[in-house]
Image (cartoon, rainbow, N blue to C red):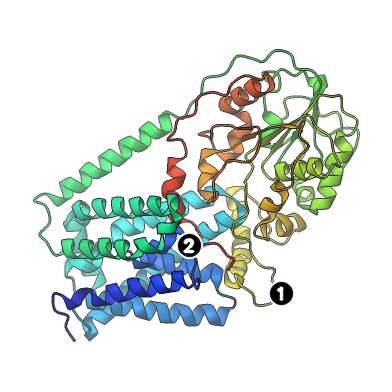
Amino acid sequence: MTSTNWTRWLPLAAVAVFVVVLAASGMVPAWPGLLHLVALPPLDQFADLRLLLVRTASWPQFLVLLAVVSAVRVVLMAWLLGGLDARRLRFAAMFYAAAFGPVLLATLGDATAYAALYSRAFWPAVALVGLLVVILGPVPWQGGVTVRGAMARAWRRGLRIEVMVPYCAAVLGLGVLADRAPALTVLLVPVSAAATGLTVWAMDREPVTRPVAALAAVLVVVTAASVIFVRTRGYDDPEPAPRQAGSLFLMSGINSRSGQGSIHRADVHRLGYECDQVYYFSYAGPGDGQPQRDSTCPIRSGAPYESADTQRPVEEQVALFAEQTANLQRPLTVAAHSHAAWIAWDAVATGRARVDVLVLVGVFPETPLGFPPPDGDRRGRVFGDLLRWAAPVTDVVFFHFDPDTPAARQLLGTAGSAQAILGEPLPGEVRVLSITSAADLPLMPHGWRLDVERNGCPVRAAHSSLPTSAAFEDEVIRFLDHRDPPPCPMWRDWGAVVMHAFGSPPSGS
């Protein structure tokens, strides 16, 4: 069966209509990534796996739907290549089979980032997807009989970069529009399909005269832009703050240990405190002191703790926080890094602890994904199992993650847990400053601002580096001194707006 000029696009239009119906009926979520379901391969496969991984309730359901969706993808590609015959069907099947492994790896990394709130998994996953789209996207449309032959021809044609650059720009632009105007998301599906169709049509045109030179030029521009971006991330050290009154209580994040955690290295002297005013939280409870290790000041209170202690149940952590802050000299400033911010907020909001200033360092406003426990079939079962199987790999990147510890189950395993904690109002007299990392913003699909006195400008530093950055010091000093915050460029969160379409869909209905 061979497609004519006008019938060639009917299956793509049919898939777009089907996706619109599924989203309009609520069978699939209308998140920005919905537009990728009608995107150029292998971005379409990435969208399929993102949905199936977190929305299916059992392995049989996942495998059956994966087989059905893959068959549809193969037929659609074969038709767009010119018609349904054995050669084109075989080519399409081999293409998707070759892409499946890397795409699945990217999908798992993407979902893990959203579940564990770990942006260092998100960015490599998206980078891998970007490479796959640029390298494999033009391959099917080069006229080769085999995938290997088509790939060789694509390279000789400079990966059709003159076609792929406009297409990638269109994909990113549509994702931004869907993110900024969610009501338009479903209506943008046909537009995304049209962009895909136009790109396939453009692949039939002759390439530019010097395709390899065009590809090299694009690579030079991208490399130069990347170098400029990295080299402009620095901040000037702020002037040291005047001497502050009261106490400063520092809380390190999950997987830290006594004296070893990012916030232990914070320059408390620049913030206006002497060591006799500084205290460090212990996840092991009260005691006579802990090893200083990397801490700026000697740790004169609390019991020594190990990373396993940071995984204890939330109620125990809240109780320990309340106990360890009860007798500290006021005014009491608490700086809590990462998941410790939820603990401090919970303790203060429920009246179990009293503080004067709360500095939330790298707090996430929501837990958007979650993962089910390993005891039966329920939505997200496949992702939960894969997450547990892959958890030992996190030790390689120095981020130990055990999804079945009490804290992980309560705070990360349940979608919406962070919203529930941060939704509890704090006493009106408590001043709150929230500082977040710009690298974490893609994992905040509904925004990074909290309902607090001040949301600091997102800092161009990694999540783990926030407490030691000059931007953190500047924000805290200004806040404690009741001064205006530093200026915040309007483009600071634009990267997250572009990236939200590449995130995992919400796991709920």
Percent position (x, y) of residue 467?
64, 32
Residue 262 lies in quadrant? top right
Percent position (x, y) of residue 37?
38, 67
Is residue 81 among the parts visible in the rendering?
no
Residue 206 lies in quadrant? bottom left
Circle 1: residue type: Asp
Q: Is residue 381 left or right of residue 492?
A: right
Picture layout, residue 349 above or below residue 56: above
Residue 413 lies in quadrant? bottom right
Label number found at residue 439: none
Label number found at residue 375: 1
Label 2, residues with CA under 10 Å away: few <14, some 14-19, many ≥20: many
**Residue shown at 58% from the left, 17% from the top:** 238
Quadrant containing the N terminus is: bottom left
**Residue shown at 87% from the left, 28% from the top:** 328
The answer for how far apart the CA atoms under marks 1 and 2 are is 23 Å
Percent position (x, y) of residue 93?
32, 77
Q: Secondary structure at mark 1?
A: loop
Label number found at residue 107: 2
Q: Is residue 23 left or right of residue 336?
A: left
Label 1, residues with CA under 10 Å away: few <14, some 14-19, many ≥20: few
Picture layout, residue 135 above or below residue 2: above
Quadrant containing the C terminus is: bottom right
Percent position (x, y) of residue 389?
61, 66
Is residue 465 among the parts visible in the rendering?
yes
Q: Does label 1 or label 2 sit earlier along the sequence?
A: 2
Front one among 124 and 111: 111
**Residue shown at 75% from the left, 17% from the top:** 244
Q: Secondary structure at mark 2?
A: helix
